[in-house]
Every structure is written in C-alpha cells, then in structure tokens.
Image (spheres, helix red, strand yellow):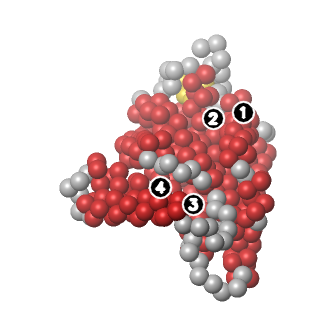
Amino acid sequence: MGNTQVQPPEDAFCNLDTREGLPVVQLYVMPSVFVAVLILGLPLNLLSLWIFFHRLRRWTRSTVFLFNLTLVDTSWLLALPLLIHYHLDQLYWSLGLPLCRTVRMLYHNYFYLSIFFVSCISVDRYLAIVHPLRSLVLLGRRQTCVLCVVVWVVALVFSIPVATMTLIQTCPESNRTVCTLYMLLSENEETLPYSLFCSTIGFLFPLLSICYCGLRSVGELRRRPCRHDPQNKKRRLRRVLSAALVLFALFYLPYHMSRNVAILMRTVYPDDPYSWRLADMAFALEMCFCSLITCVNPLFSCFIGHQFKREFRGSFAVLFPRCPGMQVASISNIQTRMKVRNKQRMATVSPVCALSAPRS
C-alpha cells in the first residue's frame, strides 16, 4: 500500500454514522441498487449482444452505434461486483490502488460513452434525412467503425484525470482504507474545473447537437412536399429525438447538476463539512439512479431500432414461451421474416423502376 495516502478525515468516506443520510445511502441504498441493476441489466445486455452477433444480418449505422452502446453497458456491469463488495464491506477497499482507479474510471467512462453514442445516433438520423447522399460518403461502413474507435479513445482520454485524482485514503480512527471519489474530496483545486469541463464538453455540447439535429431534421421533413412515407422517417425521427431527450432529462442533466453542486459547496464552504452533507447525499443518490442507464439502454435500442426490437421480442418468445403475449410475438416475428424473404425474392426478378432514398 505504498500509494495509500493518510489525510485528514473525509466525512464522505470515514464517517459511517447511520443516523446521517450519506452513510445510509453508501452502506445500504447503493449496494441494493447496484445488485438490482446487475441482476436486471446484465442478462438484458448479454441478450442484446447475442442478438447483435447472431440475429441481425443487416447492420446499419445506427445498429453499429447501438452495439457499441451495449458494449459500454456490459463492460461496466462486469466491473460492478467490485463496487458492490466495497459498499457491502463497510467501505473498506482492500484491492489496491490500480483497481480502485480502474473502477472509478470505468464509471466515468461508461457515463460519457453513453452520452456520445446516443448523440451519434441522433446525428446519424440527421444526416440520413437532411444530407442523404452526402451521408453515404461521410459515414460509410468503414467511417462509422473508425468513428466508434475515436469515440472510445476520446472518452478514455477524457477520463484519465479521474485516475490521477482517485486516491486510497486511510481513515485515522478506524485505520480503514477507502477508495475515494474525486467529487467528494475536500481539496478541490482541480476537481471543480475538471467537472465543469466535462459538463461542457461531455454533456452540454452533445445536448445542443441533439437539439440542432432534431430541429433541422423536422424542418427538412416539413419542407418536403407531402407524400407517402414508406420508411416512416418522421416517426423514426420522433422516436430517436424523444428517447435521446428523455435520457438527457432523466439521467444526464440531474447527474451533472448534483455533481457540480457537491464540488461547489466544498469550494464555497471549505471549512464547514456540515454544509456539504445535503449536496453529497443528493449526488450519491444520483449515482444510484444513473446506474439504471445500463438497464434502460436495451429498451432504448428496442424503441428506436425496428429490426432490433423484432429480434429482441422473438428471442424473449424463445426463452420464455409461456409468458403472456410471447407466443403472439413469436408468430409475428416468423410472419415478418417470411414477408422480408418474399420481398427479397421479388426484388431479384422485378425490374428496378426508380432509385430509392438512401437508408442508413
């Protein structure tokens, strides 16, 4: 434990008095929520990965982004047992500094990767509607894969300061080692600028891009002459835009607000730990709530991806054939596949009359 730092007691980690709000959240609420998220989210995301690998034959750009979103959630869920053990063990971290930094970086990383890939899906819809021909050049299959790699690298670089600010501290009274969160440290000369930077680049800019892409796309669809919409572009656009904005409003906005307030309270009242407690508890509760994103993202994929939704329901029908409605879903899935195959056979012998609009 050469990297363990002995500092003045941090109330957020060392004070476990269950008569106060924050210790109750850390000792009981957090592990309970994390266990529920792991039980519910891991099967959903593993099933989603199986569908991506074995059921989806045609991958669009949105499918690639949704796959990466599922990969992000799964990687976080696989690391979640370490945090569950930590909170169930009375905030005693015995796994060393490297794992402590890795877990804290993973949480930060998965959070912003989710934001970036949701934003990519919104931009993809915008390009497909407003710049359909140019989008085939800007975001072909190879370019889409390269963009996903860039997003992963940028998010990783984005989270490196978290590792440098994460410490293993020793509580003087109990000699208990804790894995700190940079947001809840009393010395915050670096934390507030970094948190504001992340909030601006990792939250505000993606939110503005989603709003811009949505408004431009809606305007483009309204500008076009009224005609039959066989690809349901308007409905799909409304789904993507509404789902993205709901995610930002429910999860991402409250998280950034509570995080910045918790750090700001330490800056404004550096010598009054009692004034931090309400903000700390709000942020801890928000961390619990934001872990639900890993369970919501598979539903997000079903909501905006018609092909994924069909295969997801079909897989549930196979796994749980006795559940109400699953047999109907299975029959519907088979009928849909037969219709697609018939269309493909007809397309091989029918002359092409006109070029259809490019699909993403």
Please name the residue that numbered disc 4 is placed on. Answer: 308
List x then y, in percent, for residue 188. 74, 40
List x then y, in percent, for residue 169. 61, 25
- Cα separation, mark 4 vs mark 3, equals 19 Å
Q: Quick one: label 1 or label 4, which is nearer the N terminus?
A: 1
Please name the residue that numbered disc 3 is placed on. Answer: 247
Assess disc 4: are there few (<14), some (14-19) or many (≥20) residues with their C-alpha within 10 Å of its C-alpha. many
Of residues 166 and 121, the one drawn nearer to the viewer in this rendering: 121
Please name the residue that numbered disc 2 is placed on. Answer: 105
Please name the residue that numbered disc 1 is placed on. Answer: 160
Mark 2, secondary structure of its residue: helix
The residue sitting at 51% across, 25% down in the picture is 93
View extreme (bottom): residue: 226
Please indicate, yes or no, whether residue 145 appears anywhere in the rendered image.
yes
Q: Quadrant of the C terminus?
A: bottom right
List x then y, in percent, for residue 270. 72, 44
The residue sitting at 68% across, 42% down in the picture is 145
Based on the displayed image, in which of its 4 quarters is residue 186 positioned? top right
